[in-house]
Amino acid sequence: MPQDPGPVRVDDKIRCDACPVMCFIRPGASGACDRYANRDGELIRVDPHVVLQHAVAGGGTVVPFNASAMDWDGNIVGEPQAFVTAIGAGTTYPDYKPAPFIVSSEIDGLDMVTVVTEGIFSYCGVKVKIDTDRHVGPERSLVRVKGEPVGHVSTGEYGSQMLSLGGVHHLTGGSKKEGRATCDAMMELCNGGAVELTVDDGVTLIVQAGRPPVVNGVPEERMRVGCGSATIGMFAKQWEGKVDEVVVVDDHITGVLSEHQAGKLLGIPETGIKIVGRRSTPGRYFQVAEPGTGWGGTNIQDPLAIIGAFDPKTARPGLSMLFTSTTGEHHAYYVLDEALRPVEQELPADLRYSVELIRENCEPALATVLFMGGAGGSLRSGVTENPVRLTRSVKDSLTVVTCGGAPVYVWPGGGITFMVDVSRVPQGAFGYVPTPALVAPIEFTLRLSDYAALGGHMDQVRPLSEFRNAGDHRRQVPQMSDNPWPLAHDAARRLHA
Amino acid sequence: MRVPPQIRILPDGRRLHMQHGPIDLVVEATGDPATRLAAYDAAGRRFATVLDELCGELSLLRSPLRPDGARPEGRVARCMAEAVAPFAAETFITPMAAVAGSVAEEVLAAMLAAAPLARAYVNNGGDIALHLAPGAEFRIGLIDRPDRPGLFGTTTIRAGDTVRGIATSGWRGRSFSLGIADAVTILADSAAAADAAASIVANAVDLPSHRAISRAPARTVQADSDLGDRLVTRDVGPLATPEIDLALARGVAAAHDLARRGLIVGAALNLQGRTRVAGTEAGLLSACGPNNPKGPTILGFVPHLPKVASGSDRESRRAAFVEHPLGAFR
C-alpha cells in the first residue's frame, strides 16, 4: 500500500483532506461539515462512518440504486468485499479439532484472519421484547408452547413486556418433550418465524421478530407515547383553551391536566374532578384500575369508571373533558350537564387533531428477538490451542465476534456470552442438533499476528480467494445495510457495544 | 483520504440521501417509480460535481462581491451571487450566505429537466427547494427546538403560491450567525433567496452588548470562515421577556423591509420560545397545528446539536431534516 502522507499541518491547525473544501481545523474544533475534527492534533471522524461499500441491500430496507449506468466518480457501491460467515460452515463439536474455516484476508494493509465455525449452543436462550402496555401475565409466569414450558415472563420495561425463553434448564433440565419444544420454538423465532406462546394466568401471544406482536388475537399497533403523566406534559399546550380537563388513562401513571404541573404552569383552573386510585404527586395517579387489555393497559372499557362525582363547589355545568389513552387509540369526550354528570359528545375537530398527534407520536409496536449464547466451552479450542486467550482477546477488543456477520453484544465477565438481534442475521442461519441444542454461526476476526500469538491453528489458515467463488455450495449474500462491516479496521471497538 | 460523494436511498425506500463534504441533501420526488428513478439519477449526476465546482472558486465566494470586481462563473456560484446581491450595498455579505439554498435549487432543476414530477423537494440541511406541479401542495411544519418537539407553526404551500424556497438560520444552526435568534424561517420565491434572507433576518434579531450573550470572532472558531473576525454568537443565556420581544421586533422590522422589497414572502422568527411572523403572506405561517385535520408532511429546519466527541466544548451544529411524524429526526 502506498504511504498516505496524511493531512497537512499549519501551526496547530490541520488541513483536512476529506473533501475539496480542505478546511483548516483548529484544535478542539470541527470542519465545515461537522464530520471531521482536530482532536489534540489528530484528524478524527466524529460521526459514525457509514460503510456504504458493503451495504448493497439487506432485509428489504435498502433499495439498490441503479449504479451501473452512472458515470460519476462518487461510487454508490464499490466492489463488494467478502466476509465469510459461519452459516452452514459446519462444526467439529466437541471442538478439539480446528474450526472448519480459518480465512485470511487483507484489510488496510493488515493480514486478518476470521475463524469461522457454527457453534452448538447447549447454553442459549432467547430474550423477547414485546412492545405493548397490555398485561401479558404476572412476572415469573410460565410461557408455554403447545403446553410445554419454554420460558417465563420477565420484567415490564418502557412500553414493553419482556419474556425470557429457553436457557439450559428448559433445554436439557426438564423432560425430553420440554427440551424439544423449547429448541423448536427458539429456532423458529431466531429464523424469523412466528410462534404462538401462552402465558399461565395471562394472554396468548403470537411473536415474530420485527413484526407487531399479537395479543389475544389482536395485533398491537403502537407503543404508548409515554406514561399518562408524560403525555400530559407533552401535549398540555395543545389542549390549552380547547378543553377544560384532560385525563390520560394509563395503567402505570394516569395523568390529569388541571392538577398536573404542566396544567398549573399554563394556569389551567381546577375542575373538581375526582380520580379513583392512589395519588402519587399532583395530577399523577397510580393504580386507577387493574391491569388488562382495555384503555391504556388497564382493564377498563368505560373511562368514567375511574372518576367519582365532581366536586360541586368547583365543577360547573358545561365543563368539557377529554379522556384519552397513552396511544390515542381510545378516546372519549364529555360535557357536564346541569347535575354535573358527564354526558358523552362527539369529539370536536381540534381535539381530534391532538388525539391523532398522540397516535402519530407513538412508535410502531414490534416484537424483537435477541439470541443469547455462550461460547465459553470447547468451541474455543476449535479456534486456538489455548482457549482462555481467545476469551481475553475478545475482552481486550482485539478480536471481533460476529454472528453470521451481524454485530453482537459480548456480555462482560467470564466466557464469551453474546447477544445478537436475530433480524440482523441472514435468514436461515440457525439450526439445531437433537441434544437438544441450537446451532448458531459465530465468527472470530483478528489480526493474523494476534492469532498466532494466542496459539491459533496457523497451518489451517486459507486465503480468502479460495472462498470467492459462489460455486461449491457457497452462497453470497449482501451484508445487511445496518450492520457494520466486520473487517473494518476498528471493528472490535465499534461492533461490541 | 478523499471521501467521494456518497449517494444512497434511505431505508424508507422513498428518499434519496446525498452527501459530499459539508453538503447533505435529502431529496424526494413524487411520481411513478420509473419517473422517480430518472429524477434521482439526474440528481445524483448533478450532485457528483457540485462541491468541486464550488471549491474551484471558493476564495471568491468567501469574499463580498464588489460591483466592479470578478464574478463567479459556475452555475451554482452565480446563483449564490445573485441571491446576495440585493444586500451587498447595505451590509457585509458573501455569496456563501446562499450556498445551501443554491445547491438545493440546482439539484432540483436537474431533476425537473430529466423527469416530469408532480412534487419534489431538495432539502439541504433545512434549506429547501420545492417543486409543485399545478394542483399539488406541500404541508410544512415548523419546529423551534429539537429537544421539545412542539410545532410552532404549520403551513400549506400550494402550487398557486409563489413560494418555492424555504430556509432557516439561527445561532443554533450549522452556520454562524451574528444574531441571537434560535431559528428564523423564511419563505421566498426561491431557495437561494430564502437562504440569503434568513441570514439577514437572523442577524437582525439581536441585543448588542447584552451580558447574557457570548460572542467570538468567527475565525477563532473556524479558521477559514468567510466572516473573518466578525463576532459570531456562541451562546445566549436566559433573557427577560421584554428583551426577547425587543430583539424579535428588530428582526420583524428587517423581515418587513425585505417583504416590502419583494425579496421574501414570509418569515417566522423564534427566540427562547416566543414566535413572531412577518411578511406579505405571513398568514401562510400562522396557521398553527391543531386546526389542520392531518399532520404536516415535512417538519423541517431543526437545528440539532450532537456533541462532538473531540472533547471540545464546541457543539457540532447540523441542521437536521425531520419528516412526518414528529419523532423521526435524522
Image: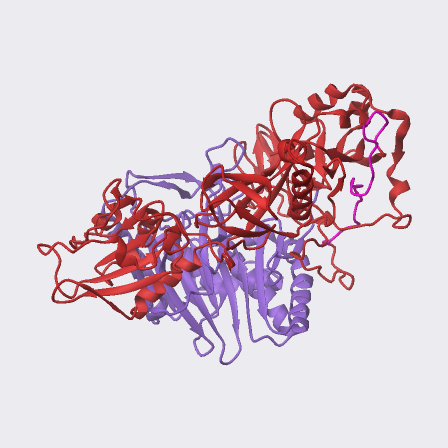
Chain colours: A red, B purple
Task: Judge whether residue A78 is colored magenta.
Answer: yes
Q: Residue at x 51, y 30 (%)?
A: B311
Residue B269 percent coordinates (x, y): 34, 57
Tell whether A341 sits left or right of B148.
left
Q: Which residues are magenta?
A: A74-99
Q: Is residue B160 above or below residue A374?
A: below
Residue B82 percent coordinates (x, y): 51, 65
Q: Is residue B292 above or below residue A240?
A: below
Q: Quadrant of the N terminus of chain A?
A: top right
Task: Judge whether residue A23 is colored magenta.
Answer: no
Tell whether A190 sits left or right of B304.
right
**Residue reaching furthest to the left:** A313
Residue B248 in view of the camera: yes
Q: Is residue A231 above or below residue A421?
A: below
Residue A316 percent coordinates (x, y): 12, 61
- Tell how many labels: 0
Q: Residue at x 69, y 63 (%)?
A: B45
Closer to us: B223 or B248? B248
